[in-house]
Image (cartoon, rainbow, N blue to C red):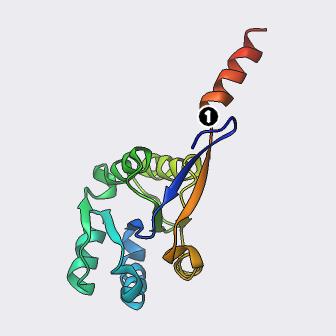
Amino acid sequence: MINDEFISFTIEKQKRIALIAHDTKKQVLIDWVEKNKNVLKGHFLCGTGTTARLIADKVGLPVKAYNSGPLGGDQQIGARIVEGNIDFVIFFWDPLASQPHDPDIKALLRICAVYDIPLATNRSTADFMLTSKYMSEEYDRHVINYNKVIHGRLNEFNK
């Protein structure tokens, strides 16, 4: 639904969840997925390269794999968000490690904010999200109508 200020999108009961982890956080994410396997098995899972393969191999859940982060996987996940094909992101990142694809990571985090996508960047936030009542029901997220915002800025600029 579109109104003047927001565009509403429904996140269905079965979530489409992206799983991403930097190298130093991969085992933490694998352990978290193993702990939450019973909940996650009811949702569609995808992830970047090695992370997706490790989860599939070690936990036994099906995970659609995109490219690894440095090879464009973060951008692929961002594109799926823009297309409306990912509802939820779990991204265990290492804030102390330099990443060669840091601009891609920042772009993904920005896309999550722009499209009002739930995003966990650590275990405790992921735990809170997964135990939320919204994991088993629909949820309407509201994306700012940026076309209106941009149009308003252009009108102000042209005055």
Circle 1 — which element?
A: helix
Residue 83 x/y as whole percent: 39, 45
Q: Is residue 125 visible?
A: no
Of all residues, the one furthest to the front in this rendering is 1
Which quadrant of the structure image shows residue 22? bottom left
Q: Nearer the viewer, residue 35 or 48?
A: 35
Query: Image point 43% across, 50% down: which residue?
Result: 81
Q: Quadrant of the N terminus?
A: top right
Q: Is residue 44 left or right of residue 107?
A: left
Q: Is residue 8 visible?
A: yes
Relative to 47, is 145 above or below? above
Residue 114 x/y as whole percent: 57, 46
Query: Image point 36% across, 71% down: which residue?
Result: 23
Relative to 104, is 2 above or below? above
Three-letter amino acid code at disc 1? Tyr
Residue 101 x/y as whole percent: 40, 51
Query: Image point 33% across, 69% down: which residue?
Result: 45
The residue beneath circle 1 is: 146
Query: Image point 52% across, 72% down: which residue?
Result: 137
Q: Nearer the viewer, residue 4 or 31?
A: 4
Q: Quadrant of the C terminus?
A: top right
